[in-house]
Image: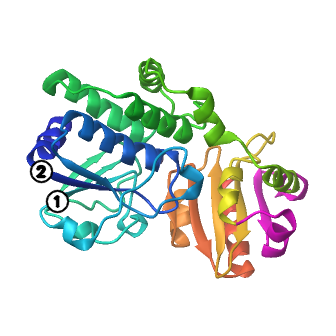
Amino acid sequence: MKRQIIDTIEKYDKIIIHRHVRPDPDAYGSQSGLKELIKANYPEKEVYAAGTHDESLTYLAQLDQVNQALYEGALVIVTDTGNTERIDGEFYTEGALLMKIDHHPDADPYGDVKWVNTSSSSTSEMIYTLYEEGKESYGWKMTTEAARLLFAGIVGDTGRFLFPSTTVNTFEIASELIKFDFNRTELFAGMYEVKRDLLHLKGYIYQNFTMDANGAAFVKIDKVTLEQFGVTASDTSQLVGALGDVQGICAWVIFIEEDDQIRVRLRSKGPVINTLAAQFGGGGHPLASGASVHSWEEADEVIEQLKKLCI
Ligand SMILES: [Mn+2]
């Protein structure tokens, strides 16, 4: 599979890489990490990272401007994105070939070439194993910048190596990546320094969540509360893991009211919850997913379904 991917990359002079909307470090890490690797090993190729830039990830990478004409004859690679609805950026279907590289469940098997590994901690980890194959068979080199990006993706998706998706391989790859001379302290600051306002909102979450006897928990944060704390809805992505350290918790949902919808952020310690997310038009990982609902009544339905999963 990896050879087929590298052979395909070698065939195209122009490569455009996409990833999912509402990006996280693994989305940026796999997208821009792959871009850096291809650029370093095939300097004559044009490689672009497409999508809408997220200010909170500026410490990782900047994106490239792409237009429709650029897609003609291009290889388009989409990383870290399970389904086409979540692909960020237009025109991704307009290249000569579409390739999917991802670690989410393959519910939507899009693309002409697909490489899906759900047992990988992150797509960034997959990109590292692609590099290993490249190194072995094609003489690929790693760069410090690619190492920094892939390391960030792995750290992000494993919750700093805490999640069960973290394997012996993950640690081995991380230990290889930190041999490169990037500034880890600076990287961690970019990833985890939390604004004071956000910490106050975190306190609010711990003071106001509700949990039943089976460990199903929820908290609702409406727009007024967000304004009171001076926090934007997108800032709250840093708080999804909150409540995970509550003793006895089974699964939880944090609702964030936005202008036109209520964002549903689901996390679990055991029961699979991406099926629940899918019932409400969302998706994601078995233990970390999201969806959107359009009323607090609908939010209550999510809570009822979540309670059933924890029995
Ligand atoms: Mn990922």
Q: Is residue 136 magenta?
A: no
Q: Which mark is residue 11?
A: none
Q: Is residue 155 above or below residue 306?
A: above
Q: Which mark is residue 12?
A: 2
Depth order, front residue of 207/175: 175
Marks 2 and 1, the one that precedes in the sequence: 2
- Measured as percent of width and height from the top left, residue 246 is found at 80, 42
In which image quadrant can residue 109 be found? bottom left
Asked if labels 1 and 2 touch by Cβ distance under 8 angstroms, the answer is yes
Regarding residue 212, the answer to whether it shows in the image is no
- Residue furthest right in the image: 207
Q: Is residue 31 above or below residue 109?
A: above
Regarding residue 275, the answer to whether it shows in the image is yes
**Does dot 1 land on a helix, a strand or a loop?**
loop
Q: Is residue 227 above or below residue 183?
A: below
Q: Residues within 10 Å of mark 1 (few under 14, many from 20)?
A: many
Boundaries of the magenta span: 205-232
| Tag 1 residue | 74
Which residue is pictured at 43% across the width and 21% down the height? Answer: 180
Residue 14 located left or right of residue 155? left
